[in-house]
Image: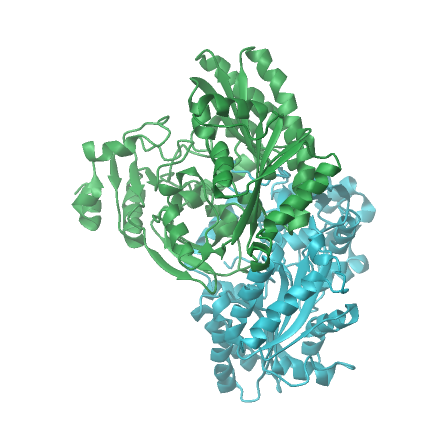
Chain colours: A green, B cyan
Amino acid sequence: MSDLDEIAAIIGETRVLTGADAAPYATDWTGAYTGAPLAVLRPKDTAEVAAILKIANAAGTPVVPVSGHTGLTGATMGQDALMLSLDRLNTIYAIDPEARTARIGAGVILSSLHDAADAHDLIFPLTFGARGSAMIGGVLSTNAGGSNVLRYGNTRDLCLGLEVVMADGRIMNLMSALHKDNSGLNLRQLLIGAEGTLGIITAAVMKLKPKPRAYATAMVAVPALSDALGLLNTLQDATGGAVEAFEYMPRSYIDRHIALISGARPPFEDAYDVNILVEVGATAPRDATPGPDGQVPITAMLEDTLGAMMEEGRLLDAVIAQNDAQRAEMWARREAAGEILVQGGNFVNTDVAVPLDKVATFLTRVTPRLKAIDPDAHEVVVSHLGDGNIHHTTLLKRNDPDVMAALVEAVEDVVQELGGSFSAEHGVGLSKLDTMRRRKDPVALDTMRAIKTALDPKGILNPGKVIPD
Amino acid sequence: MSDLDEIAAIIGETRVLTGADAAPYATDWTGAYTGAPLAVLRPKDTAEVAAILKIANAAGTPVVPVSGHTGLTGATMGQDALMLSLDRLNTIYAIDPEARTARIGAGVILSSLHDAADAHDLIFPLTFGARGSAMIGGVLSTNAGGSNVLRYGNTRDLCLGLEVVMADGRIMNLMSALHKDNSGLNLRQLLIGAEGTLGIITAAVMKLKPKPRAYATAMVAVPALSDALGLLNTLQDATGGAVEAFEYMPRSYIDRHIALISGARPPFEDAYDVNILVEVGATAPRDATPGPDGQVPITAMLEDTLGAMMEEGRLLDAVIAQNDAQRAEMWARREAAGEILVQGGNFVNTDVAVPLDKVATFLTRVTPRLKAIDPDAHEVVVSHLGDGNIHHTTLLKRNDPDVMAALVEAVEDVVQELGGSFSAEHGVGLSKLDTMRRRKDPVALDTMRAIKTALDPKGILNPGKVIPD
């Protein structure tokens, strides 16, 4: 009996996809990475995942875990591998509204978790564009970020427990719901963000948070990007740390938004260089309940804070959303980033992070270097500024791979000079593998290799990704 | 030249302590673990730490890192090892008030970091009793907790970057100050809490937080412990997550406090079973600035919330501190825990955690089992209830090691039944090594062993601690 027959006998023949059935899995969401898998396997539970890994490990067959297939780095490319889809492990086992936890399978879609929390007047705060397809297994394996990491942290900050199937098929039970646990090495944190190279996450315990009862949202223009961190700190201090989003859009982004998106309008009457979307969330009723004048206190607080800063000359302009439609327009401008970039032909983009006080330096330093490589290069930047996370895109007139590589290299050079990271929230996968090899601390790389070899001696788990040879 | 001579030639003869000079290091703060080291080494910087490890690794000589020596589990016991003291790596390299980070050496004393942050009107929030001696290297290596983890997280949540000397003396540079970084396996999180078994932490980048401008503190009595989580959630919702401490003291604790501590007074006129110290911190000026009536808004908010709960019959009693002296008295009651336990002869204590909604079940279930072992057993409990962390102590009339072991076993049985951890915040060291062997998930144990062997093949780093053979 072949390995696939053996697997089919365990998980059912209809759950082993080959040929045309497997074809949709050959290309991920980005379309940039294509690879024909040996087969796509759709186990129904952890025991079946374990059985598959036992067989694959014995045979030394590569296994690539996949959940929503929405990653941006090619980490789920399954060429010549068994693709192990976690989509059927989609059970929400329990929502505990008192302890504010959710126990869920790795195949639960992110937006389903949002809905399940909402039914208890709670939120699972992590969110991003692909929330309708991304599954929690992938969210954990890439330590996904998004727009409100500032307040709630990255995925790893929102996970209390994990169940993991190791390379040899053994099940590691770390499914606790504990806020303090110092019983040995923290394997949970090691597995989160490992992109499926050390084990396959099959279930998790996630934290839930109180649902904000009201939001106050504004567009703010400051004189220079170096003034932005002062604005953030002032807002954090004034609101007791309630800033949920702090998103930077430079003039070039605003211009492009207006040029490309039908119905798009400028945020202010005048045009400014440094435009920031600010959102504050109020969970306390006293902040969210409209007063006798009809005004929501959180909105009044934002208005007072921005008004005082304006009087001090620290702001150039500020507009506060007065209703849901105005708030939606502010967010639509930010969320158009993907569309704005794709329209326009040739581009290279990066997902980098620098220390909070180095974003302005980064942007000042990178521009002349890009222009030196390609005088026609045009930068479009959008940034989760509160996390120091910059999505930097360079548009080019020509589709020249050498020039494109040189542009990425120039961006990453500046990142490295400023003590930043070449991968802030998307991970490494295949797309940053060469960068890892050249730019990551060599002792850290060797340490990663040693851990990989120790936990997956035959190298079957997502081989060739994340950790360069 | 002997290894010690070689080391002396590098770090200086006066920095190699032996004989009487080394004797003070033989016993830690608890006095429970004693071991004569081969020598105590006091390198001045990372390069000297690296040089020492190269020599020790070549010779296969055990190295036990020590900083403040205030741990509670024997993790720094240095019998037949080179004790590597980090006390001279005590430089605060930089405080960045805008990015709200501190770059410091592993030998910086926790209270020195507190002072350095305070000078910029910021806080490093993590704190505990031994703050005047504990050093940041040990704080990180044990992932220390304390009383305000509820709001600010454990040590691992407050660390952005690390510098680590690996077993073979190579220096791993993870000294970033990034809020998002998905460039490969998260080695920082693996090293934090590893108790010096995988590498020696020599420097770190820590997060700083806005300093609360005012606190509102209260003692609250609820009908039953199972009502406490509802109180916590109500307070979190009302204050937007500003609860800094939520500390449970049962009637037996209060009685013992009054009996043993001179001048101690009961928290309420009547005596209750479930007494909780609540503290809310206000960072926003609007919450901290006294109104025309002289009242501080954060205090008014706490009063309103507790008042409403009282009317709903959800509280039995509540007293809000009206001034600093009253707040200090409330905290003194909680911080007397150590004294209260030590007076009284024979005892066994544990540091356990259970899910937030299981604390009441834990206490109900554990009592009859202890009484069955020793009818004279008397429990004293104090709990960081907001984290599910219970410091459970059993007082005995007789000093009988078998009975003591049986009592600990009974507590840990209940912890395990409820999905808890036998070590919440103190770590494993030597004291929980046998428990690790018997109670930790066996696949997790094997995974820890594999990682240990991969990163420290000769087993020189803090051997015999944390990870059982």
> Where does the image place residue A266, in percent across and percent down from the top left?
54, 27
> Relative to A436, is B270 on the left or the right?
right
> Relative to A340, is A319 on the left or the right?
right
In terms of image quadrants, where is residue A464? top left
> Where does the image place residue B365, in percent across and percent down from the top left?
47, 79
Classify A286 as above or below B363: above
Query: Which residue is more in the foreground, B287 or A102?
Result: B287
Residue B111 visible within the image: yes
Classify B261 as above or below A104: below
> Relative to A37, is B408 on the left or the right?
right
Q: How many marks?
A: 0
Classify A18 as above or below B148: above
Which residue is drawn at the image coordinates 71% and 70% (left, top)? B331
Determine the residue located farthest toward the right in the rendered image. Answer: B14
Which residue is drawn at the image coordinates 69% and 79% (left, top)? B267
The N terminus of chain A sits in image quarter = top left
Determine the residue located farthest toward the front in the rendered image. Answer: A293
Residue B409 visible within the image: no
Which residue is drawn at the image coordinates 77% and 69% (left, top)? B323
> Where does the image place residue A198, in percent across and percent down from the top left?
42, 44
> Where does the image place residue A66, in percent across and percent down from the top left?
34, 40
In terms of image quadrants, where is residue A70? top left
> Relative to A359, is A100 on the left or the right?
left
